[in-house]
């Protein structure tokens, strides 16, 4: 195959923006997007709430500076302040750019883009399209990529990065339709494969495929991962499925109520109440549940998200998807009765360590979006900042890769390398001595993570979690792939995804065990306070001889000094 | 995935999933496999399929991603109707089973089959490209990002529903035209085309419309409404199709294409006679040459079998034609008025 200048892995918001921007930067380049699903299926579509930008359409006194401060404070001061500067300064431009390309934003009375309040934000600056914001952004980007003639390799599962010393030669991927292992020699590679929170399996709001494929491949290639221990639990997942009810529901005025009929957030965030930052609200709900003030049911203890006082009109016009999901997955109409919810693993703040341009330590390898970690979210991401992150840094990574592609030689990927990859897959697929069920391993991984590496963490629990993961990795060596077909072998793909999740789970648990403080989403019961003297730093996880090796990296400070984080 | 076996104390039912199977590597033709599992209330078809894949037969192949009804991956035919497996309740479809206790699961129709429940989506993507299903902005790329277009809530509402489309292809699968003609534009692409055409930011309304009125385009739809009935997001797809047609007649005139001419001939017949003058309909729609080239053999057969429609002079007006004409005039006036106010 002809060598590519830029190959992008992942067709969500970050990947598509990168592709579009790379083509804009240099139309003569040979650019391709590889995605294990059709790009319009990507998990960006599930983002309901919106994207933050200080457009000042709603609150006329909103400023980029306020957005920056909210983001840094929300991150519990672990975000790099120069990166946050980029994120928030680019926000108004990128939202307008999307608007100019055709994204259907909801509108205010003066015909400008509508904005609503969101958790942890001092002003209503979250731009939205009813409760389908991510979906409409993804559609727009996909449409624009089709218009520009971006080359798509849909339903290709990336297996490995081909590495030559300190730089990459391209990728090796499996064509799902044929089962063939194919080489994608490339000058530059951008990983934009989304997050890894699906490792919590049933206690996760994520799509089945959010298995951190890009991060796992980078990690196995020796590229460090940053801040992996920070996993955000969304306060309001549906009781039975873990599926998400957007923060928009609280933005529009929803209440959180315990079984005593109490709006308990008054105890935890007197001023912001239900619109406190996510980590705080999730912990508050979990505390209510642990202290016996939740509702009991056969499907687990839960609390109520009450929207009934908002009225049928508002719910139907502003939160139609929420209503549909509550009815489809819980049998509850939020117009009539409260929605049963509990916290669910939702977002991974950690990811491939990059600089502000999306560059990793390996020449020609970039990362963006939830897959990367710049870091703009630090220890806790604010609602409405994730869509923004994928757009801003997707674009930057695309631009940078297109500009720098000329710096890197186009490598070749040898037949031997392809053969080795094929052998590895054959090894996994062989039946003799392979008997472990992947479904069981996957579910056990989710359980141990939720119990031992979940919202409340503690030394002995974490040790148990680390032990469990290591045992699961052993058992994985005997995992059985029952489907022997070459054509669209979803069984094989799920097993390979499980391998990625297991590798990453180790880094999450190791990072959580090492970090002896509580910061943002990471709550250690045995170290309940933030310890700036010892832990105001990023953690780095690198694979050395197949094991996690932890390192650190300083946080880039700027205008804002460390402060206690209260709401 | 939690087993669909009980976590609740609700009653359970034994349900047999009769799943369409085909692996092109080994099977010469498709067949069905039966899987019987115990299912409680509140369990979706997708969770049941996941359970079957994890516990009974890992080779059963289907697509699924978000499992929350927003990504559109798991479109399939469940008891004959195309829908999303992740938002379809087992107990709800069980009521509609032809054979009690059996739910039939088949791949979507009208798209090439790859394996089991997986079909090839590329033809749909190709059509999206062919009909320019994107906004080609009136704003030059270089000036983007500086300021917003001002868009009224009213305009937003014109395409709000259409942008709910998740391209699950349920409408494609149910479309009766596509079954006969794979080249037909397809409902999802018409919907997207409409969405682009009513967006004031778009600069290629005319060329897109010109493509839509060609063969295999918007005039081929026969208003069976099956796309709309199947839509998992309850989008009024037929409104979009009618919208494109009205737009085509208004901005391109009635003599533009055979589709427009056909519609015009219908209107004029109904106004004059209260019924169709079928004998000359092909000539008025497609012209003399086309009719002679394409319909002559059929006409000869019809003559032999004495099945020819009566010649125009012999078509009598329908009973009560005077009253009808009055109603017809009133109705068309009404529609015209409606259009005017809508345009504003």
Image (cartoon, rainbow, N blue to C red):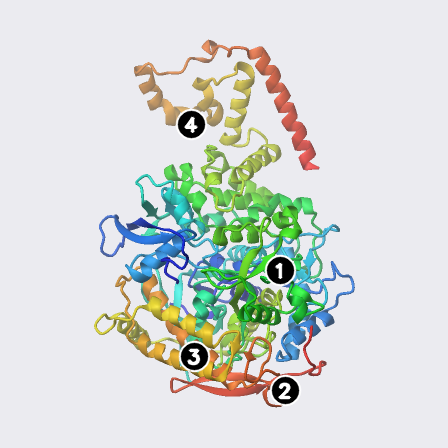
Q: Which of the labelled discs sits on residue A465, or is there none?
A: 3
| Residue A129: percent from left, percent from top | 62, 54
Q: Residues within 10 Å of mark 1 (few under 14, many from 20)?
A: few
- Name the mark nearer the viewer: 1 or 3: 1
Query: What residue is disc 4 on?
Result: B290
- Name the mark nearer the viewer: 1 or 2: 1
Taking the view exactly as shown, the residue that stands out farthest to the right is: A61
Q: Report the front residue among A90 and B213.
A: A90
- Name the mark nearer the viewer: 4 or 3: 3
Q: Quadrant of the N terminus of chain A?
A: bottom left
User: Label 4, label 1: how many angstroms apart (C-alpha)?
Assistant: 75 Å
Name above or below for residue A548 compared with residue A451: below
Q: Report the front residue among A481 and A172.
A: A481
Query: What residue is disc 2 on?
Result: A532
Q: Quadrant of residue A186?
A: bottom left
Q: Chain of mark 1?
A: A
User: Label 1, label 3: how many angstroms apart (C-alpha)?
Assistant: 35 Å
């Amino acid at each position: 195959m002809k060598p590519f200048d830029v190959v992008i892995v992942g067709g969500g918001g970050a990947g598509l923006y990168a592709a579009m921007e790379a083509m804009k930067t240099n139309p003569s380049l040979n650019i391709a997007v590889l995605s294990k699903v059709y790009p319009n299926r990507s998990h960006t579509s599930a983002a309901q709430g919106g994207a933050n930008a200080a457009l000042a359409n709603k609150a006329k006194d909103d400023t980029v500076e306020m957005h920056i401060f909210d983001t840094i404070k929300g991150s519990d001061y672990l975000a790099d302040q120069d990166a946050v500067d980029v994120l928030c300064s680019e926000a108004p431009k990128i939202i307008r750019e999307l608007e100019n390309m055709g994204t259907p934003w909801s509108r205010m009375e003066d015909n400008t883009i509508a904005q609503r309040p969101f958790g942890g934000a001092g002003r209503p600056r979250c731009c939205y399209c009813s409760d389908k914001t991510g979906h409409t952004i993804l559609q727009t980007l996909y449409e624009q990529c089709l218009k520009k003639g971006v080359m798509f390799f849909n339903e290709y599962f990336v297996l490995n990065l081909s590495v030559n010393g300190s730089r990459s030669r391209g990728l090796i991927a499996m064509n799902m339709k044929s089962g063939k292992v194919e080489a994608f020699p490339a000058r530059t590679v951008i990983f934009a494969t989304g997050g890894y929170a699906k490792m919590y399996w049933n206690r996760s709001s994520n799509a089945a495929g959010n298995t951190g494929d890009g991060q796992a491949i980078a990690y196995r290639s020796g590229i460090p991962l940053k801040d992996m221990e920070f996993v955000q639990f969304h306060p309001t997942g549906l009781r039975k499925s873990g599926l998400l009810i957007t923060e928009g529901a609280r933005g529009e005025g929803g209440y959180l109520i315990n079984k005593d009929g109490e709006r308990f957030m008054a105890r935890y965030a007197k001023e912001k109440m239900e619109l406190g930052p996510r980590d705080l609200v999730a912990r508050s709900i979990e505390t209510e549940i642990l202290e016996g003030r939740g509702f009991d049911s056969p499907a687990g203890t839960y609390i109520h998200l009450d929207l009934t006082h908002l009225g049928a009109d508002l719910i139907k016009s502003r939160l139609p998807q929420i209503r549909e999901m509550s009815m489809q997955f819980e049998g509850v109409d939020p117009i009539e009765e409260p929605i049963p919810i509990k916290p669910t693993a939702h977002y991974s703040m950690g990811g491939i360590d990059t600089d502000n341009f999306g560059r990793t330590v390996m020449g020609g390898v970039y990362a963006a979006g939830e897959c990367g970690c710049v870091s703009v979210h630090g220890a806790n991401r604010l609602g409405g900042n994730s869509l923004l992150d994928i757009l801003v840094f997707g674009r930057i990574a695309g631009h940078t890769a297109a500009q720098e592609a000329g710096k890197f030689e186009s490598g070749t990927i040898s037949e031997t390398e392809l053969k080795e990859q094929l052998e590895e897959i054959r090894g996994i697929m062989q039946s003799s001595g392979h008997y472990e069920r992947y479904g069981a391993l996957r579910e056990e991984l989710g359980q141990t993570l939720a119990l031992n590496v979940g919202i409340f963490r503690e030394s002995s629990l974490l040790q148990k979690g680390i032990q469990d993961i290591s045992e699961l990795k052993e058992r994985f060596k005997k995992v059985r792939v029952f489907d022997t077909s070459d054509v669209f072998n979803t069984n094989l793909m799920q097993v390979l995804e499980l391998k990625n999740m297991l590798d990453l789970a180790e880094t999450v648990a190791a990072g959580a065990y090492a970090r002896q403080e509580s910061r943002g989403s990471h709550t250690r019961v045995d170290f309940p306070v933030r310890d700036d003297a010892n832990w105001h730093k990023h953690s780095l996880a690198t694979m050395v001889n197949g094991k996690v090796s932890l390192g650190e990296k300083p946080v880039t400070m700027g205008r804002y000094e460390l402060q206690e984080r209260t709401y | 995935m939690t087993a669909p076996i009980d976590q609740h104390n609700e009653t359970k039912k034994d349900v047999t999933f009769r799943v369409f199977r085909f692996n092109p590597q080994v099977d010469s033709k498709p067949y069905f496999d039966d899987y019987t599992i115990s299912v409680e209330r509140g369990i979706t078809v997708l969770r049941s399929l996941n359970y079957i894949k994890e516990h009974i037969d890992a080779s059963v192949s289907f697509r699924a991603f978000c499992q929350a009804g927003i990504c559109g991956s798991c479109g399939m035919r469940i008891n004959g109707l195309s829908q999303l497996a992740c938002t379809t309740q087992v107990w709800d479809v069980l009521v509609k089973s032809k054979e009690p206790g059996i739910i039939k699961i088949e791949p979507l129709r009208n798209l090439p089959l790859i394996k089991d429940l997986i079909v090839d989506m590329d033809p749909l993507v190709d059509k999206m490209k062919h009909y320019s299903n994107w906004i080609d902005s009136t704003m030059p790329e270089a000036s983007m990002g500086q300021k917003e277009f001002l868009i009224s809530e009213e305009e937003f509402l014109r395409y709000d529903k259409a942008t709910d489309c998740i391209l699950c292809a349920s409408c494609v699968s149910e479309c009766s035209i596509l079954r006969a003609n794979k080249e037909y534009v397809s409902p999802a692409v018409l919907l997207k085309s409409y969405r682009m055409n009513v967006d004031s930011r778009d600069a290629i309304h005319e060329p897109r419309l010109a493509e839509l009125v060609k063969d295999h385009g918007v005039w081929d739809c026969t208003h069976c409404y099956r796309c709309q009935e199947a839509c998992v997001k309850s989008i009024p797809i037929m409104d979009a199709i009618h919208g494109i047609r009205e737009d085509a007649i208004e901005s391109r005139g009635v003599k533009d294409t055979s589709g427009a001419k056909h519609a015009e001939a219908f209107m004029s017949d109904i106004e004059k006679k209260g019924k169709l003058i079928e004998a000359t309909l092909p000539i008025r729609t497609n012209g003399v040459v086309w009719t002679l080239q394409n319909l002559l053999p059929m006409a000869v057969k019809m003559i032999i079998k004495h099945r020819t429609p009566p010649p125009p002079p012999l078509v009598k007006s329908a009973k009560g034609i005077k009253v009808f004409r009055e109603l017809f005039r009133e109705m068309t006036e009404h529609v015209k008025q409606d259009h005017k106010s809508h345009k504003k």
